[in-house]
Image (tube, grey):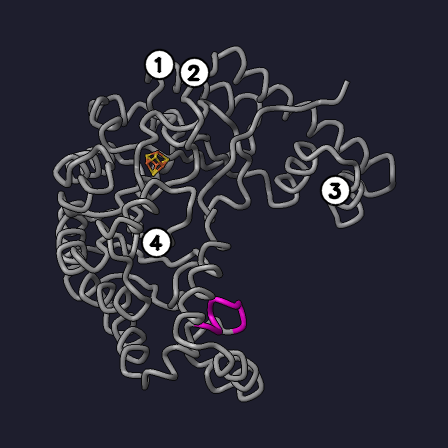
Amino acid sequence: MTLCFEQGPIRPPSEAASLLLRLTRNCTWNKCVFCPTYKGQTFSRRSLGEIKKDIDTVKEMIRLIREYSLDNGFSGAINRKVLEYFYTGGNYNMFHVAMWLHDGAKTVFFQDANSLIMKTADLIEILKYLKEQLPTVERVTSYARSDTLLRKSVDELAQLGQAGLSRIHVGMESGSDEVLKFMDKGVTSQQHVDAGKRVKEAGISLCEYVLLGLGGEQWSQEHALSTAQALNAINPDFIRFRSLAVTEEMPLYQKVLSGEFKVQDDAGVTLGQKMFIERLEGIQSSVISDHSLNLLEEVKGKLPEDKPAMLGVLDRFLELPPKEKQIFILGKRLGMFHRLSDLHDTEQYRQVEQMFNRLDEGQYAEVIAYLKGQLIC
Ligand code: SF4
């Protein structure tokens, strides 16, 4: 019988080298209008027995992978030949575990969107079992909704931290109540702040996600200022940028068609991002841009010392002549440009400019929207 264990659809990019273990299925809330991930699916819990069985399966897979390496003269190492063997073997779980071993087998991510909904005692039991069975694990992280975190006391969160839960990823999206309400996030700005502070007080590393462009044209300034204000109150370890792209699968698409929501163009989003960073004050967070949908991925650094450099990148983009801005946006969305300085690569520039010159204004907007939609995950 083929060995397998259950995995969900997504993880944060920073967990690319992590073992993905599914504790719960889908999202407890599932109403955010900008989020297509679990639409049409219902939330369900997995039993402790099912989760432990998956951990046992991973352990058995590790044994088999090491055995293959030894039997083939690789001394138990997980080298390219071993990875190739499991890649072509057709068992995705097995290849995932082989990759995890290759990357050091140190980190684990609990799926899906809100596994902190589980009882604290059950989470502790899973964390303990995981560490017993897979002793190389050093870091365990999970997504959590702010309202769910508020159902746990600081003491409970601290117990989770002591049992091995190292980091919590929270989709703040916005610190503006107007934006959160319109987007049906189901959480207020104050709840985000209280939950974030609670995680920090419990000694668990905290990563807050900000969704650039979520204020649209209507609430761009409000989104920027209120989100900065909320994060200033929390001082999370990490602030990570995501960027809004609207596709047909999202309920937000209907609000765009009806005119209730006006999508900002990339220049407008960048202006909002500048306003946001300008207002981040008194915190020591690392600002990270690790998603290809972000227009200016080079806007990242440690606060407060890197704030001027981050603002400098945004200013350089905003000061470009209109045509240069559009060419950079097109090149970035095509994957041909990665940094603003790529505009000086004459050959790449020539190719992007040729494409740009073939598009009229309407076609340009359609191409950009299409390319952005392709990058959603
Ligand atoms: S954004 Fe997060 S909380 Fe909202 S529906 Fe998607 S997965 Fe659920």
Q: Vertically, is 330 above or below 272?
A: below
In this rendering, the label closer to the viewer, 1 or 4: 4
The verdict on residue 333 being magenta is yes
**Amino acid on which the number 1 mark rests in the picture:** Ala
Return the residue found at the far right. Answer: 72
Residue position for label 1:
121
Q: Is residue 366 left or right of residue 70?
A: left
Question: Residue at label 4?
Answer: 244
The amino acid on which the numbered mark 4 sits, given as a three-letter code, is: Leu
Residue 373, x across and y down, in percent: 46, 54
- Give the answer, above or below, for where 261 lies relative to 53: below
Do residues under tags 1 and 2 come within 8 Å of each other at their CB atoms?
A: yes
Q: Which of marks 3 and 2 is in front?
A: 3
Residue marked by disc 3 = 87
Give the Cα distance between marks 1 and 4. Answer: 36 Å
**Any mark on residue 176, and which?**
none
Q: Which span is picked out in magenta?
A: 330-336
Kindly report the distance in space between the C-alpha atoms of the residues bearing marks 4 and 3: 33 Å
Q: Does the magenta stretch include residue 308?
A: no
Marks 1 and 4, the one that precedes in the sequence: 1
Task: Find residue 298 and report its horizontal and vertical position in percent.
Answer: 39, 68
Describe residue 376's horizontal placement relative to residue 313 as left or right.
right
Estimate the spatial distance between the alpha carbons at disc 1 and disc 2, rounded to whole Å: 6 Å
N-terminal of the pair, mark 4 or mark 3, is 3
10 Å crowding of disc 2: few (<14), some (14-19), many (20+)? some
**Above/below status of 335 relative to 358:** above
Q: Is mark 2 on a helix, strand or loop?
A: helix
> Can you identify the residue that label 2 sits on?
125
The Cα–Cα distance between marks 2 and 4, rounded to whole angstroms, is 37 Å
Of tags 3 and 1, which is closer to the observer? 3
Q: What residue type is labelled 2?
A: Glu
For mark 3, give the secondary structure.
Answer: helix
